[in-house]
Amino acid sequence: APRHIRHEQLVNGFVGHLRQRANAGEIDVATACRYESALRHYLDFVQQPGLTAAQRYAAGIDREFQLQLASYLNNLRIAPNGRAGTTIRPMKGQAFVLDVVRSMLEWAADPEGGNLLPEGFRNPFSKRARNTQRVARDPLKPLDITTQMATELVQVADRFQLTIFAPLLLYGLRPGELGWLFAEHVQGGWLSVPNILELDYTTKGRRDKRFPLVPCLANLWNLGSRAGTGLIYPHRAAAEGQRQPPLAGRSLSGLASELRNRYVAAGSGGATQRRQVRDRLMKDAGQLSYDHVEDEFQQLARRLRWPAAATLKDFRHLFASCLQNTGMPEFYRRYLMGHAFGNAPIITYTHLTEEKVQEHYQRALATELSPLAEAIQGRAADFGVKVNA
């Protein structure tokens, strides 16, 4: 292995390795992008003037280098999500960046991996340093979005916003999951939130889940007036007729067929190109994105003068807390939240049933979630939406 590998060469080699793994299906292309984004902070650091001559090469990384990088990240201020024009804030993902650097050095030192570092190289990032400033979360800390706050949001939401936030409140869905719900997923009184492999989409955790259909939701979605196919959630411009996306209303099978045709036309450009093709297809279908949901949330949060601590993710905190307060067993809470169950043998042998999921959810809907459901039904009636009993 050559000894004089510069940090830029190290990063380029590791990013190329990640892209190969994404092409091979070992990791998601989004994972490769997150790693590459984290390593930009690493490259910014190594361009600082304070490094020694030895540290300017990858083989010169030592314990002092590790401490300097950790200190640099602790003092780094960035724009949220990399958006230009936003207020910069202290970085929160230092541990993730350090973990990515550790993985990169492990790969580079492996003779069967990158083989870029000399024999005997010791990785100073091999053990995660304990952050002495980190404290455990107080479980008695009040929710940043309470049931009362959520009810107020429902009462001031317009028709489009109500349609978006109703399932976030009643199902605890992740905002990004809304844009992957199809009318085909509503069957037999259940809403499915599945992995859609034909569209190269997997949920976080790669787990399917289903929810008993709350009566008012189907009417909010106008499913009765459709052909029973297509995206449930187009973005506002498409939903209100201000813009007509070229693939608006296309069924799930129709989009999957179109995606296959576009893959063939694009050739074999790798996982990154495939993801770009897929994202372009969904944009042509008018898909509601996470950013669309965030924009709608921020409009309402400003109108209600909510504190900055209240975020979209707090809807999931509220939902999980409501399930806990009804005494729902953890196994069922994990299922509805889309969380992993673990690998213990008792989990492997345990199976859920539709009847019990229905029973536990309906108990939560009739108690802790009841104020939210009533507010949603009342607001839906304001817009002339019929609510089934």
Image: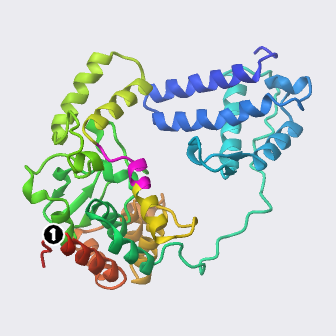
Q: Residue 186, how many percent across, how many down? A: 17, 58
Q: Does 243 appear above or below 223?
A: above
> Bounds of the magenta span?
287-295
What predominant SS class does the magenta segment belong to? helix
Q: Report whether residue 350 is seen.
A: no
Q: Does 344 appear above or below 62?
A: below
Write the residue at 51% across / 63% down: 311
Image quarter of residue 164: bottom left
Judged left or right of residue 36, residue 255 is left
Quarter of the image for the C terminus: give it.
bottom left
Judged left or right of residue 318, residue 259 is left
The crowd level at tag 1 (other Cα within 10 Å; few <14, some 14-19, many 20+) is some
Magenta segment includes 146: no
Residue at the bottom extreme of this rendering: 367
Write the residue at 57% across / 22% down: 16
Magenta segment includes 290: yes
Q: Residue 52, how many percent across, how many down? A: 92, 28
Q: Residue 342, how many percent across, how many down? A: 48, 59
Q: Residue 206, how many percent across, how many down? A: 39, 48
Write the residue at 56% across / 69% down: 307
State the residue in front, 258 or 195. 258
- Identify which amino acid the numbered label 1 is placed on: Val
Q: Is mark 1 on a helix, strand or loop?
A: loop
Q: Report whether residue 383 is seen.
A: yes
Q: Does 338 appear above or below 248?
A: below
- Kindly identify which residue carries mark 1: 385
Write the residue at 39% across / 57% down: 296
